[in-house]
Image (cartoon, grey):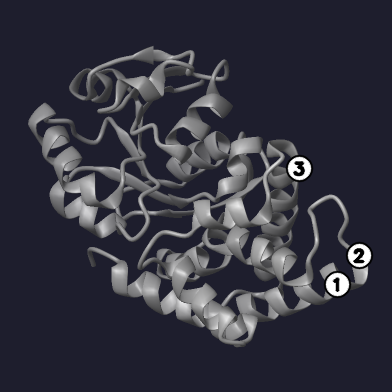
Amino acid sequence: MKKNIGIIGCGNMGSAIARRLKGQYTLWVCDKDTSKLRDIAAEVLLAADLVQRSEVVILAVKPQDFSEILELIKKVGVGKDKLFISIAAGITAAYIEQNLPQARVIRVMPNLPAQVGEGITALSKGALASLEDLDIAAEIFGYLGKTIIVDEGMMGAVTAISGSGPAYVCFFLESKGLSAANVPSALSDKFLAEFKEAAEALGFSPQEAKLLVEQTYKGTISLLKKKGALPSELRCQVTSKGGTTEAALEVLSAGGSWTEAALAAKKRAEELSRGG
């Protein structure tokens, strides 16, 4: 049976999730900035009402706003009857569970091509979440592209590969003077081989590396084409100051390898992580 879903936070990713799920579930949304909600055809609720009414709550707020949202949820007094799915980078399931002791938590890391249904989302379950909860989350994020289940300890590596990956694809295109519409197979094959090698260096199996890398590449190319965006524009959209992507791009700009860049991104992801 389809669950009622509430989404708190409608920035780039939260709104992308809402648009992909629209018509598939009973869907409610909320955001401090109500202007973001005008073109999302879902019922808008206050956060407290949304939490009370939803069976699944997707937490799509920025990491710096996460504590405030957890405080609000605590005041609502929800228990194990809710499934919380967090997309916040660097926020561990343990951190959420410390603040919401009875919470069933699934942590996910989607990437930007989710906007056009071509993303790759990694999922991991918290201490109290069940395999059924994991299945529910996988079904939800299946509307945004492909999914992969990983141990939560690999989420820093996921961030470094598929989370930051769209920026790597854009950097590759820019460095070769290419557009998304015309990439010679010899160049894309070489890039993909080096990108997969980087993913394996971070601990992914060859099969996991292949899925993460190939879907990130395919999804980014598709996103560029559908949005009519330049690689430089998309790269800037993915790259936040002091973040994982910036750490990787600094290595690449200095002539480093894709593996060195991915390792730098993973290191930065772990430095930014909050919670056990």
Q: Are marks 1 and 2 in contact (CB under 8 Å)?
A: yes
Mark number, residue 225: 3
Q: Is 253 placed above or below 154 here?
A: below
Q: Is residue 109 left or right of residue 81?
A: right
Task: Indicate the quadrant where residue 43 lies.
Answer: top left
Amino acid at circle 2: Pro
Amino acid at circle 3: Lys
Residue in the image at 45% along x and 75% along y: 247
Q: Is 150 placed above or below 67 here?
A: below
Between residues 43 and 258, which one lies in front from this camera angle? 258
Q: Say which label, 2 or 3, has the lower sequence index.
A: 2
Position of residue 56 measured from the top left corner of the image (x, y, whole percent): 37, 30
Residue in the image at 74% along x and 51% along y: 221
Q: Are marks 3 and 1 in contact (CB under 8 Å)?
A: no
Mark number, residue 187: 1
Q: Residues within 10 Å of mark 2 (few under 14, many from 20)?
A: few
The answer for how far apart the CA atoms under marks 1 and 2 are is 6 Å
Q: Residues within 10 Å of mark 1 (few under 14, many from 20)?
A: few
Residue in the image at 27% along x and 21% along y: 50
Q: Is 250 placed above or below 14 here?
A: below
Position of residue 116 measured from the top left corner of the image (x, y, whole percent): 65, 36
The answer for how far apart the CA atoms under marks 2 and 3 are is 16 Å
The answer for how far apart the CA atoms under marks 3 and 1 are is 18 Å
Amino acid at circle 1: Leu
Question: At numbered mark 3, what does the secondary structure look like: helix, strand or loop?
Answer: helix
Between residues 35 and 140, which one lies in front from this camera angle? 35
Residue with the mark numbered 2: 184
Could one spot residue 19 in this view of the protein? yes
Question: At numbered mark 1, what does the secondary structure look like: helix, strand or loop?
Answer: helix
Between residues 229 and 54, which one lies in front from this camera angle? 229
Q: Is 167 placed above or below 220 here?
A: below
Q: Say which label, 3 or 1, has the lower sequence index.
A: 1
